[in-house]
Amino acid sequence: MQRPELFDRLDHGMQGPLTLVTGPAGAGKTLLLSSWLVARPQTGPVAWLALEPADARPGRFWNALLKLVQLATAGELPPVRGPADDIDDDFVAGLSGAVQTLRQPVTVVLDDFEQLRSQLVIESLDRFLRSPQRGLRLVIASRLDPGLSLQRLRLAGQLTELRSSDLALRPDEAGRLFELHGLELTTEQVAKLQERTEGWVGGLTLAALSLRGHPDPDAFVRTFAGDERTVADYLIEEVLHHQPVAVRDFLLRTSVVDELEPDLADALTGRKDGAQALRLLERSNAFLLPLDEHQQRYRYHPMFQELLRSQLRYRMPDAFTLEHRRAARWFAAHGMAATAVRHAVAAGDVTAAAELVCEHWLSLIVHGEGQELADWVDGLAPRVVAGSAELALAGAGAALVTGDLARAQGYQQLADARAGMVPTKRRARYALSRAIVTMLDARVRGDFEATRTAAHKVLIAQQLNGMPQDSRAVAHVTLGIAEHWTSDSGSATERLEEALELARRDSCEYIVLDCLAQLALFKALAGELHDAAGFGHAAVQIAVRNGWDEHPCAASGFLALAIAHFNWAEPDAAQDHLASAARAARRSQSRTTDCLIRLFGALLDARADIPAAARVAHAVRTDIDEWGLPRSLAAMAGFFEAVLLADAGQSDRSRDALARDSMRSEAPLEDAIIRARLALADGEAAEALRHLRAASPDSPAQHPACRIEALALAAVAKDLLHDDEGALELIEQALDHAQPEGFRLPLLAVGAPLRDLLKRRIRAGTAQRALAGEVIALLEERRGAPVADQGRLLLDPLSDREEAVLRYLPTVMSKAEIASELFVSINTVKTHTKNIYRKLGVGTRTDAVRRAKHLNLV
């Protein structure tokens, strides 16, 4: 089998005295070396010695080696004094001198080197490698690290090493192996087998043998594991049977855990030599892989671990249960609650599992194990859950973070009914747990006043009773969210930053994700787009790294990125991030998150269907009212609905939306923007300015996007009133406000009338030439937009008859001639013309033609 990269490294090894190839049984050592020698013929002689236990006598080993070299060189090697079992310096010196006389170096492969369980052979070979010679190139293939002075050779640059990780086949190489066996597997099937075996050549070869003539290859691939018969037989014969009884017992007992460290190994085996045993197993390539540089953490190869667990379960069932119980106790004592519960469940110890869940449920949630916690509680016997208020609270907490409000409510009722049965010594812990569940429940429902009250209770209880820090971090992040939605954004940021510091200090990435995602969302809603993107990307990276990218906690991070890209006028990127937010939130019943995703989804969908988008915004507003969500969210939804209704040409309904939401008090500038847009659509530029001035668009307290749009609308109004200087000054202010955060959408929302104004601003000179040019280019793109987008540029669309009249206005035809062409009266043409002027915001036929061209209507 061709492996060019490894062949290159073996070729490089021929420049030094020793090349070492080590790996477990079936790692492909012999296959690699034999393929290399065929594919890359050596310039000099080659000798191959497959070692056996009998070769452990020094005299026999060296005699066999000398005979092979003599044969390979056709007798060119000078005679060397026959070695005895006591190899002295004279023999080593004589052999070194003899190989120096060879015309070309000899490559000697020593295969199965682990068979030489003789320190005398190792010492004599080590002395030979220390001697000055360049006529012999040794290649050692072994399951074990030979006891040679490898560090000396490494430092001298005289050692080439290929280890297990180097020998493992990549997916493309695994595919070629299956092809050599005459198998045609899909890319997905090959990838699955490569992943399952971690590229172990022996495992892949056994899979190939098993797949020949298999009736259902896909089913085989899905279930292929270490307890599959061909793999199990191989590992038992080649690995387990080669180990002493004490080592086999160690392997079986420690296989129940995914990662091993010395102290844990001692706890599982009852021995005190865990560190030494693990180091020896690693050196022997017994499918034990180190996870750090300090030899403190290890794991078994997954297929070997499957075999060990299978052997333990069926041959030593009592030990299987005992080891899981021991593991549960050890992990609980070391603060790893989720792992402890898994082992208690595996041991079938319902009592221990329930106790662990009651004590550590919050820790499980804040470390991202909410779904697993819910499964455990639901999986316990109903009588066990029904009899424990603490366990019922754990179930409620898990249901809340996984988005099942109905189940959470049922568990809370059960907990309240059994609260009197909680032992006295655990009542303080129970009270804290009840407050935490109340806080989480209020957060999901969007009752942020209740959330705020409950969070303060949690912090007080935690401080008085010295409970775990988990509750403090959760309370701070939840309190920060509540303070944001109850109009205390400055305090909210401080709370979230404090929670973030606590979570990072405790290495709690789940809470870090929650903090970053919420900070990102709040920054995005406040118009701080660059900070929002920074926090959002940081949150998404953590989510992806931990497999939480479809967890409710990540939804706010994706939503923040969608809002940022939406305001940057990058709709495709915004749509992608919003889709990710929707996927992450689908298992959550967080009402605020749901409303925000639907609202911004409606704005993006309006590119294709404005009336449908307006209907979605209206439905969201209705839900906000029904659920009693924050007034600021209601005002946002009202603004979006009014905007969409105006864009759909439904002026009266847009005004009704403004009145119904009382936006003049909650969002005065947003209210003024809609009224100004409607006034401009009616050709009332002075009225538009009156609305905008009353709302103080230049106030720093206003949302930046609204401030930018208000200034741009005011500029258009002044332009229509022939105040050229005032219009240019206002558009420059709008650009100045837009540039720091990169806002483009608020300018685009004003539409085509802004395009000529921006061009004049550039000709007159501007500090924001690049931004102005980008907006002009985007507006130019919209000139060729489909009808749905043109409707957004014209607030009150023309009727079919008005469009028919408009097509004649660029001509020199009189109204009477147009009436004759359309078979209508001249008065009808006059009425349609008046409506066209009003909707286009112009007063003359020439201006109407110019504006219609800008809007790509003619």
Image (cartoon, rainbow, N blue to C red):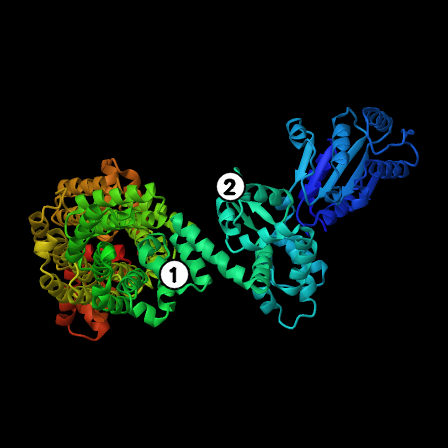
Residue 280 falls in image quadrant: top right
Identify which residue, 20 or 551, lies in the foreground: 20
Q: Residues within 10 Å of mark 1 (few under 14, many from 20)?
A: many
Q: Position of residue 315 (x, y in %)?
A: 59, 63
State the SS at label 1.
Answer: helix
In the picture of the structure, the residue carrying the numbered disc 1 is 353
Give the answer, above or below, for where 398 lies relative to 268.
below
The tag earlier along the polypeptide, 2 or 1, is 2
- In the rendered view, does 188 fall on the left or right side of 766? right
Can residue 415 be seen here? yes
In this view, the mark in front (2 or 1) = 1
State the mark number for residue 391. none
Q: Amino acid at mark 1?
A: Ala
Q: Position of residue 795 (x, y in %)?
A: 20, 60
- In the rendered view, does 802 fall on the left or right side of 165? left
Q: Residues within 10 Å of mark 2 (few under 14, many from 20)?
A: some
- In the rendered view, does 829 fall on the left or right side of 398? left
State the SS at label 2.
Answer: loop
Instruction: Residue at the far bottom: name it.
Output: 823
Q: Amino acid at mark 2?
A: Gln
- In the rendered view, does 158 fall on the left or right side of 495? right
Can residue 547 be seen here? no
In the picture of the structure, the residue carrying the numbered disc 2 is 296
How far separated are the C-alphas under marks 2 and 1? 28 Å
Q: Position of residue 227 (x, y in %)?
A: 61, 62
Residue 551 falls in image quadrant: bottom left
Q: Position of residue 19 (x, y in %)?
A: 71, 36
Location of the C terminus by quadrant is bottom left
Tally the marks. 2
> Which residue is depicted at the point 35% across and 47% down?
508
